[in-house]
Amino acid sequence: MRSTAVTGTGRPVSFNGRDFRRALGQYTTGVAVVTARAAGGRRVGMTVNSFTSVSLDPPMVLWCPGKDAPSLPDFAGAPYFAINVLAAGQHPLSRRFATPAEDKFGGVPTADGIGGVPLLPGAVARFECRTARCIDAGDHVIMLGEVVRYDAPGGAPLVYHSGRYHVVSGHPEL
């Protein structure tokens, strides 16, 4: 896959999409599962690493599902969603919610958050959000959420780097 970018001089430059993705993978991210209640009460969830804070006042976060995600219409239509930041030992949950399945929640205990949004136990942080806005962004959608409630018991997070799961360790010089 070839894409075109524009340099600072305004000249177009071609680059390989696969190589671009590999380069982006050099940025280590946390791993989260976003959950919501779809119309009719069905629970939906997907693994993401595109989660970030946006604002402290008002408290806002964002995440970016791909436009080809089967559950995108469910998330876009949901009044609330939750970001469940996974702990180091929760890589099986990450894989479960990253894989298409009829019922990703089968056998997974949950608690009900605001608007009935499923909350996953054991997460190092959870953010319950009111869907504020969906913004078209290339082959993804930016989902902005206003944080209504959160909890952060802490612990070692699950991280993703260069196409693999990792755990965080303290820097030896600090």
Image (cartoon, rainbow, N blue to C red):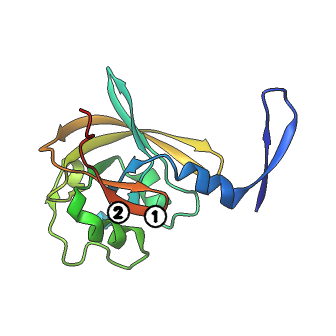
145 over 122 or under it: above or below: above
Q: In the rendered view, does 165 fall on the left or right side of 116?
A: right
User: Is 130 on the left or on the right of 143, as rendered?
Assistant: left
Q: Position of residue 133 (x, y in %)?
A: 47, 38
Q: Residue furthest front?
A: 173
- Mark 2, residues whose alpha carbon is within 10 Å: few (<14), some, or many (≥20)? many
| SS at badge 2 | strand
Does the residue at mark 1 contact the one at mark 2 (Cβ under 8 Å)? yes
* Location of mark 2 (residue): 45
- Residue placed most toward the observer, 138 or 16: 16
Q: Residue at x 20, y 50 (%)?
A: 156
**Residue 147 in the image: x percent, y percent?**
28, 35
- Identify the residue at image location x=52%, y=63%: 69
Specify whether residue 15 is in view. yes
What x and y, as percent, mark residue 72? 49, 59
Which image quarter holds the C terminus?
A: top left
Q: From the viewer's perspective, is residue 96 above or below residue 33?
A: below
Q: Earlier in the sequence, mark 1 or mark 2?
A: 2
On the image, numbered disc 1 is attached to which residue? 71
Please name the amino acid that badge 1 sits on: Ser
Q: Amino acid at mark 2?
A: Gly
Residue that appears at 33% across and 65% down:
94
